[in-house]
Image (tube, rainbow, N blue to C red):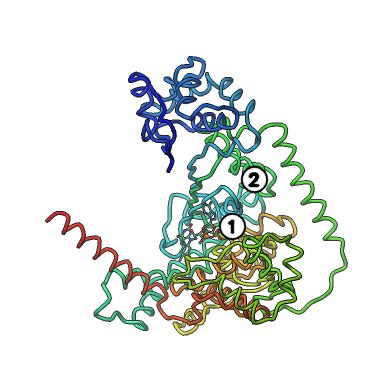
């Protein structure tokens, strides 16, 4: 199928290539053991050469002293500092290849894993507010307890400007109060969960303990403030990092700006050629543009006469949708199958009987066996705009979806907080509310003088408003994934409401979402933990059979 005349390499060439490619004879192969800069530069040559990648690797890198190839590759295996020196020495060579031959997208050809540890949740949200090209992973508030104390005390950011202000003592007292309450309530909440949902003999003690801890942490996470320190790991390509660094440079938080500089310094050590634009004149000007536009709009917004609205209890509101969505989706379903222009297909879809439209939509959804089987791009035709008011904890979870437009308002205590009903039942709601109230008072005191930094004081249990604009295809993914039994109850309720809203306006289009779980559960993670047990048992049984 992929036959073409095999490439000819001399035995000596084959020996040189072998460590860096998964095979030297077939047309499909992977690169391996090569530093990012070499892989990126090598790939960028694809667009300007008739030669194969392995031939380019030999002729333009391995055998070219100017590329510093052997020194760079030797450093990758042995000493990273040596590799860095070698990359720096060969920088002019790689710059010429990368910039001389490529467009902006060459910066996507090199990637890096970067760990950002001990950052606040404000910074974590900025890091994760990325779409194409970045994959974040963050320490969970569900599987990790936040009651530990280090040398600085509880793990939250003491923002330097706040610490230098007269509010420092009030701020730390309120934050300590939140963490102390969280720590003090963990044991009684766990005891209540165990008493309320006792382990049945078919559930392993491990699965049960994990489910109990997850439920307890879920119930108390509302106490954690935005200043809470967390760890975020990011994998991404240079171009995505470049934009992220620019956004961090433009951020109104000193922590974020310093974080961006620290990240730049580390990325410069592994993918310097791919992230140099963020600190270039162009990058600096872009950051200044982002900051200036934000400030200009903020100033104009502050001068507007605002209507006085009652606090809205509706948490998920479908604000906008396309009444023609069904017709447009049917036209898009037909588009790849017929040779007609799109406008003619709109007319065809609009004129056909409704039963035919429904049949086409059903055919395009097909027999979905699992939620992973998503319908095609025609389902990107309908768009829905939601306005959501829910606790910050739920926002933190849902913000992580990348294939949609999301934007939040500032973190504030103005929309109040809800006490999880379970805490009322346990009899600890008063302690919970008192700690939340103390944080709210500090936020209010800080707000005028420190409008940005005050947000560090806001606990996850307070509500935030954010808008989500998403297409139907992403709605399938988001709603089905986030309504799954093991999810946090708050975001489950949000996506269940989104499903109801979409179903109300477009029942035919929504019917294909077959894996939306509308139920409520007591010990949400239990079934997932039981499945994990079964997986482990199957793996152990397999290993035993292999060893037999
Ligand atoms: C039960 C549960 C527990 C979780 N626990 C944690 C946790 O402990 N820590 C944590 O950090 N996060 C956690 N998450 C969040 C999770 O890691 C994702 O960030 C989140 O689900 C959103 O990403 P997504 O890929 O599902 O969807 P979207 O970002 O909405 O993307 C939609 C789809 O597009 C594709 N896609 C999008 N971007 C990429 C990409 N860069 N590369 C390849 N394909 C892509 C994928 O097919 C993806 O499913 C958890 C999520 C769930 C549901």
The residue under the point 53% across, 20% down is 90
- Tell me: residue 105, above or below residue 251: above
Position in image of residue 136 (x %, y %): 51, 52
Position in image of residue 272 (x %, y %): 56, 31
The residue under the point 49% across, 54% down is 230
Q: Mark 1 points at which residue?
A: 402
- Rate crowding at label 2 as few (under 14), some (14 to 19) or many (20 or more) other CA atoms within 10 Å: many
- Rate crowding at label 1 as few (under 14), some (14 to 19) or many (20 or more) other CA atoms within 10 Å: some
- Tell me: residue 291, above or below residue 300: above
The quadrant of the image that shows the N terminus is top left
Kindly state the secondary structure of the residue where label 2 is placed: helix
Q: Does the residue labelled 1 lie within 8 Å of ligand 1?
A: yes
Q: In the figure, is residue 154 to the left or right of 472?
A: left
Position in image of residue 421 (x %, y %): 51, 82
Q: Quadrant of residue 44?
A: top right
Position in image of residue 190 (x %, y %): 38, 74
The residue under the point 20% across, 57% down is 543
The quadrant of the image that shows the C terminus is bottom left
Q: Name the residue under label 2.
A: 248
Kindly state the secondary structure of the residue where label 1 is placed: loop
Front position among marks 2 and 1:
1
Q: In the figure, is residue 220 to the left or right of 261?
A: left
């Amino acid at each position: 199928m992929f036959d073409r005349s095999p490439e000819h390499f001399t035995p000596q060439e084959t020996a040189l290539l072998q460590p860096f490619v998964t095979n030297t004879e077939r047309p499909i192969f992977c690169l391996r053991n090569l530093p990012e800069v070499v892989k990126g530069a090598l790939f960028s040559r694809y667009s300007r050469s008739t030669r194969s990648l392995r031939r380019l690797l030999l002729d333009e890198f391995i055998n070219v002293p100017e590329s510093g190839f052997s020194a760079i590759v030797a450093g990758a295996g042995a000493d990273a500092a040596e590799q860095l020196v070698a990359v720096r020495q060969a920088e002019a060579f790689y710059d010429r290849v990368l910039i001389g031959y490529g467009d902006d997208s060459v910066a996507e050809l090199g990637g890096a894993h970067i760990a950002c540890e001990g950052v606040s949740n404000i910074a974590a949200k900025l890091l994760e507010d990325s779409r194409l090209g970045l994959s974040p992973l963050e320490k969970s508030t569900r599987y990790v307890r936040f009651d530990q104390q280090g040398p600085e005390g509880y793990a939250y950011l003491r923002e330097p400007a706040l610490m230098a202000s007269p509010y420092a003592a009030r701020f730390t007292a309120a934050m300590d109060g939140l963490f102390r309450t969280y720590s003090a309530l963990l044991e009684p909440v766990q005891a209540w969960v165990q008493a309320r949902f006792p382990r049945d003999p078919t559930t392993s003690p491990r699965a049960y303990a994990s489910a109990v801890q997850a439920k307890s942490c879920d119930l108390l996470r509302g106490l954690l403030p935005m200043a809470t320190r967390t760890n975020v790991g990011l994998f991404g390509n240079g171009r995505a990092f470049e934009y992220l660094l620019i956004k961090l440079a433009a951020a109104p938080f000193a922590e974020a700006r310093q974080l961006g500089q620290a990240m730049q310094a580390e990325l410069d050590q592994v993918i310097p050629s791919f992230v140099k634009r963020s600190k270039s004149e162009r990058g600096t000007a872009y950051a200044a543009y982002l900051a200036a536009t934000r400030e200009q709009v903020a100033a104009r917004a502050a001068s507007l006469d605002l209507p006085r609205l009652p606090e809205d209890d509706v948490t998920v509101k479908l604000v906008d949708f396309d009444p023609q969505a069904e017709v447009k989706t049917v036209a898009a379903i037909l588009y790849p199958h017929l040779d007609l222009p799109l406008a003619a297909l709109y007319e065809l879809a609009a004129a056909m009987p409704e039963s035919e439209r429904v049949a086409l939509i059903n055919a395009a959804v097909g027999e979905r066996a699992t939620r992973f089987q998503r319908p095609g791009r025609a389902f990107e035709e309908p768009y829905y705009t939601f306005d959501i008011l829910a606790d910050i904890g739920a926002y933190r979870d849902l913000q992580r979806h990348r294939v949609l437009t999301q934007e939040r308002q500032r973190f504030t205590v103005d929309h109040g907080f809800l006490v999880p009903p379970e805490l009322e039942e346990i009899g600890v709601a008063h302690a919970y509310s008192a700690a939340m109230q103390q944080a709210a008072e500090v936020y209010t005191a800080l707000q005028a003088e420190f409008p940005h930094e005050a947000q560090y004081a806001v606990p996850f249990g307070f509500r935030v408003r954010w808008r989500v604009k998403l297409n139907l295809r992403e709605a399938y993914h988001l709603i089905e994934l986030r309504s799954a039994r093991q999810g946090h109850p708050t975001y489950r309720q949000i996506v269940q409401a989104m499903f109801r809203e979409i179903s109300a306006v477009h029942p035919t289009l929504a019917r294909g979402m077959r894996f939306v779980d509308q139920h409520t559960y007591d010990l949400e993670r239990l079934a997932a933990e039981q499945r994990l047990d079964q997986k482990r048992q199957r793996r152990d049984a397999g290993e035993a059979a292999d060893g037999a």
